[in-house]
Amino acid sequence: MADTVAGPAGTPAAVRHAEEVMGTVFSFDVRGGEPRTVREALTEAVAGLHRADAVFSTYREDSEVARLARGELAVADCAPEVAEVLDLAAEAERVSEGWFSPRYQGALDPTGIVKGWAAERAARLLADVDGVCGVSVNGGGDVQLLGAPEPQRPWRVGVADPLRPGGLAAVISAAGVAELSVATSGTAERGTHIVDPRTGKPAVTDLVAVTVVGPRLTWVDCWATAAFAMGSRAGSAWLESLPDVEGLLITAGDEVRCTGGLAARLG
């Protein structure tokens, strides 16, 4: 059930909702628009997340991706979203020179791109509602921001400090841009789970966390994973080479590396 919260006079109402799906919690914060219409769109956005989970989950034997991996389906037999996501994953693999991969231990597994793609898609659906001025969709700590919550006040996202539980490593501001996303890969929450695509084994890296900032969550989620697997030196240099992308990399030794333009996004 979505909650509608009236703001102070002259500020947009907020419709908020949290949904458990894809093994995590997606939090929605939608500002502006007619609340009933926003709630209807929110119902559609949430249904889209559950559909993505059903189609792409590698934990469901009957999912289209699982059947595709077993050779029981061809891509043409799957929902159109499957071809779309596989094309995006192939592009992420190309841009990252193989450090992001839609395979795991030789089998098809595009889940590394699905959560960011699904969250971004949900956010854009909500942003298209008449009168909506701001949307925040947070999928397990990876966030897509569109518009602004109030006039003259941007969205802001706190980045958890992986070495100091309860602390913040940075606060990212969306001031001056119409869309911004923030994604973090690391070991603080889920332990060692990021795979080196070259070996198929857990990535051996000096990093504990990589946060990537850019316009689209679909991509920054992939870039955070790839940069983490690369390690701090190669990862920071690669992120620096990407247009409209900034990064914050923290090593196990508490060394912090930032791309050159990150300072403009802090606040």
Image (spheres, grey):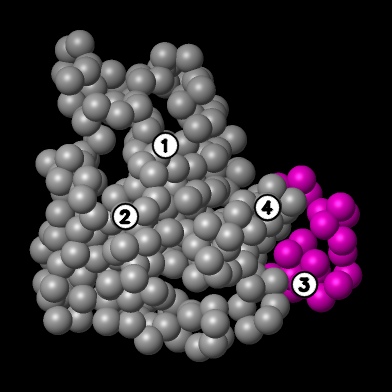
First in residue order: circle 1 vs circle 3:
1
Range of residues picked out in magenta: 60-81
First in residue order: circle 2 vs circle 4:
4
Identify the amino acid type marked 2: Glu
In space, the residues marked 2 and 4 are separated at their CA atoms by 24 Å
Name the residue located 28 percent from the left edge and 72 percent from the top edge: 233
Q: Is residue 78 above or below residue 202?
A: above
First in residue order: circle 2 vs circle 3:
3
Q: Can residue 209 be seen in this view?
A: yes
Asked whether 244 or 158 is in front, the reply is 244
Residue furthest top in the image: 10
Number of residues whose C-alpha sits closer than 10 Å to that of mark 4, classed few (under 14), some (14–19) or many (20 or more):
few
Disc sitting over residue 69 in the figure:
3
Asked whether 44 or 66 is in front, the reply is 66
Q: In which quarter of the image is the N terminus?
A: top left
Disc sitting over residue 87 in the figure:
4
Q: Quadrant of residue 94?
A: bottom right
